Amino acid sequence: MSSVVSKIREPLITGHKSYHDITEDLVSPTEKVPGPSWVIAFIVSVSVLAFGLFCIAWTIWHGIGTWNLNRTIGWGWDITNFVWWIGIGHAGTLISAILLLFRQKWRTGVNRAAEAMTIFAVICAALFPGIHVGRAWVVFYFFPYPNTRGPLWPNFDSPLLWDLFAISTYFTVSLLFWYTGLVPDFATVRDRAKGFRKKIYNTLSFGWTGSAKHWQRWESLSLILAGIATPLVLSVHTIVSFDFATSVIPGWHTTIFPPYFVAGAIFSGFAMVLTLMIITRKVLNLQDYITIEHIESMNKVILVTGTIVGVAYLTELFIAWYSQYPYEQFAFFNRALGPYWWSYFGMMFCNVVTPQFFWVKKFRRNVALTFFLSIIVNIGMWFERFVIIATTLARDYLPSSWSFYVPTWVEIGIFLGTMGLFFTFYLIFVRVAPVVAIAEVKSILKSSGDQYLGPNAIHHEHSGHDKVIMDPIHSDEISDEHHGHGDAPSDTPGSPADIGTEQAVKTGKDVKGETKVSNTYVPSSRKEGSEKDDLKKIEGIGPKIEEVLNNSAIMTYIDLVNTDVGRLNAILENAGSNFRQHDPSTWSAQAKLAAEGRWEELKKWQDELDGGKTKK
Amino acid sequence: MSYRNRSIVYGLYNDEEVLLDAVKVANEKHLKIMDVFTPFPIHGLDPLLGLEESRLHIGGFVYGSLGTLTAFLGMTWIFVQDWPQIYGGKPHWSVPAFIPITFELTVLFAAIGMVVTFYIINGLGPGVVNPYIDPRITDDKFCIAFDVHEVNQVDAEAFLSETGAAEINAKTL
């Protein structure tokens, strides 16, 4: 699409990708046998998950007393981890919904994985309220339904119940949004798959065809889902913060909580997206789709939200002092200088100080530093929740009931188990679904691909797209030979012969006057001297290479004759690894014959050539 | 929109801009396009094909309103009629406290309703096998298809080759 994009924008897809390259690069991880690093990571994740499940079973079997919670500190690691995971689950929908509404194109590179991460993080989070109630087998009492207990209804005035609704809704909507985006990409995987895989992906892709009306509705649906998911994502952490803010505990009872929690959630969510995407792009070789530009954009979000969180911390301190309310003042004094001072300073350092590195462009674009800081931010955000929950509860109104809290191995095990759950799901996702949204990346290629934008863009003044050349099918003897010498590097999957009840076409216009029947009918090329020649007639040039050459402003045979082999090699080199194997040494000589219309000679020579190369 | 048992002639284009130009030409020539199949949504195509704006958002509004009413009236009935209790000195009908759940259910109903509607009206769903034209349409080919009962096959083929289709085929779906 030739939408207008400012020239100072950086390309979001590098490596001069064609549409087919995008399919190839993004689908291939689901088609290959997993590598050793994946297998090791999977075994570790599943083992940790198994230990977590054991700890959960232990909790349920022996009761909640296996945790170190006590009368004073009623919420410890359980709710800390719950809020932490929910916060991490905020980036996905933020990226896919809010950035869609703001038309941020860099969203396309990371939204799929971020949404997947959201869903897995919400599952991890939802586990904690489920088991911290103690009697996990009657956890369905949470839900309002007509029952034989009265009927007894939950308290709709309670923020804890609002939380249940918020998280269930958030999970459902995120899942629907994510899956709707996946359907066209599953269709792409399906159309390349064979046998049993094809059956699986046929089911997963819901029979997607790519019809114009379907796409129109798909875009409409995405836009509206984004529109309603945007307030939803803001509401979820707002309601989580109400769990605290509507209470009368000093340090919790503050009106700043909703925006402060939402900013913190986005902050930690983006940190987790960065942690995962930096590993994913490296392991799956997706540097062309998740570029430094993407990382820089996310680092800007980290900087903004981290600074908002910092301002919120300082505001809390100021208000505690300014309110002249001794219990509130003590709560903050206790956080910073009480027995848990280290978690407060950990939080301040990790969340407020470290993101400030990202004021510097060089640091924003440094992958190693970003990776390191993203982990620091995640640790800092965990500390924040711990400070708010356990530290605040440890010193309440009555000094006689002051307490201290360290988790037991069971609590630590459950937290590790959710990590295992998260990474197990993520690793399965990486194998099953394209990690980057294929259709969405294709739709931004022409506005954000590096052959169209940025310093490496190839300027092609006459693309030939604007004028459709209307010359009638004229006789050309070798147009039928297209498949004979089309040495396309990445030949498309599924030849026409695969297609079920195909009927042959009668072209009826064959030069020899015969009624010719062929499966594939290749239209005529344009006449020589017109704006664009059919370069595919050169042996060794297939449709892909033709496209590459056209992008480099080589449109006609004459252009090709005038291009030396060194430049051709350079063009192929730039076009990606698939093209490097091609040898353009005979192309300009072939083009010369074609340009002069000496087709018979050319054809004769091509019969001798081997894929465009001189036989050795 | 399933195209079963239709005999079609179709052309595969390599570039969406070529396809857009081709659709314009088809409109000029009054050739009735059965459908266009593409690997990603193409902006500017819908008006050329005469597709009306999707009414899915109206459905979204209706489902969302249904959610609003369900939540608000449900909570009202439960707390005023079925199980009147006093929590924290609030009145039975404490409207501000109902807002969060009302909002959440509005979003939930709208989202589920729209997604289900989307799959139903498109004829898509788990286990649906739609006849497909060419596996490369989900990869890098852009397809214009004509129904041979609506358009003369020879005209269609001539049109496709003139407008730069890379391949032209016919088949029965």
Image (cartoon, coloured by chain):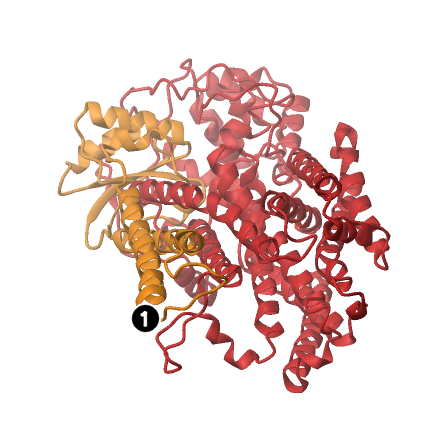
- Indicate the chain coloured orange by its letter: B
Image location (x, y in percent) of residue A134: 61, 78
Camera-side residue: A445 or A193? A445
Q: What element carries label 1?
A: helix
Position of B51 compared to A1: left or right?
Answer: left
Image location (x, y in percent) of residue A386: 74, 58
Camera-side residue: A295 or A487? A295
Position of A536 compared to A313: left or right?
Answer: left
Amino acid type assigned to the residue bearing label 1 in the image: Asp
Image quadrant for the C terminus of chain A?
top right
Q: Which residue is drawn at 32% across and 49% down?
A: B133
Give the vertical position of A539 relative to A30 (above or below).
Answer: above
- Indicate the chain coloured red by its letter: A
Image quadrant for the N terminus of chain A?
top left
Q: Is residue B166 visible?
A: yes
Camera-side residue: A110 or A355? A355
Position of A329 compared to A297: left or right?
Answer: right
What residue is pinned by disc 1?
B82
- Mark 1: few/some/many CA within 10 Å (<14, 14-19, 20+): some
Q: Residue at x 51, y 76 (%)?
A: A139
Q: Which residue is drawn at 66% across and 33% down?
A: A293
Quadrant of residue A3 in the image?
top left
